[in-house]
Image (tube, rainbow, N blue to C red):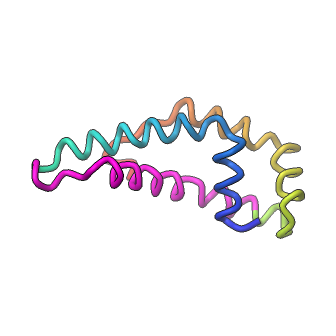
Amino acid sequence: MTYKEFLEYLENNFDGYEVFMEKAAAYQQLKNQKRPAKSRWNDGKVYKAANEMWKKAMQPLYDNLRREVKSGIDYKWIEYIEQHEVLENLRDAMVDISFNEASI
């Protein structure tokens, strides 16, 4: 499974994705409000920054799974993710996630 496919899988099958994106977008909006008025980003750029946060946050998980699964076949990844309750553990982490200046 490629990283792009992995992200798509999470975005379609992991309900914590919305939680992460809401928190990341709120964080980016807060950062945006601190910028001078003429330097503020539009909503699209704020969303893009939140999406980049998502990608950065999921990279270590992907790297760990790739080492464990040792296959490029999608169903092997999904099988491993389900057997090891990866989404459940990730969901628990999303509940506690918060962003601040030190986290980025």
61, 53: nearer the viewer:
53
Residue at 56% across / 30% down in the picture?
95
Where residue 70 sits in the image (x, y, percent)?
84, 68
Residue 89 figure quarter: top right
Q: Is residue 52 above or below residue 88?
A: below
Residue at 66% across / 65% down in the picture?
3
Residue 46 is a magenta residue: yes
Residue at 75% across / 44% down in the picture?
86
67, 31: nearer the viewer:
31
Residue 86 is a magenta residue: no
Image position of 79 (left or right of 99): right
Residue at 68% across / 64% down in the picture?
63
Question: In this picture, which residue range is highlighted in magenta?
Answer: 37-65
Image position of 79 (left or right of 20): right
Where residue 18 sits in the image (x, y, percent)?
55, 37
Residue 34 figure quarter: top left
Kindly report the secondary structure that dominates the magenta region of the rendered protein.
helix
Q: Quadrant of the N terminus?
A: bottom right
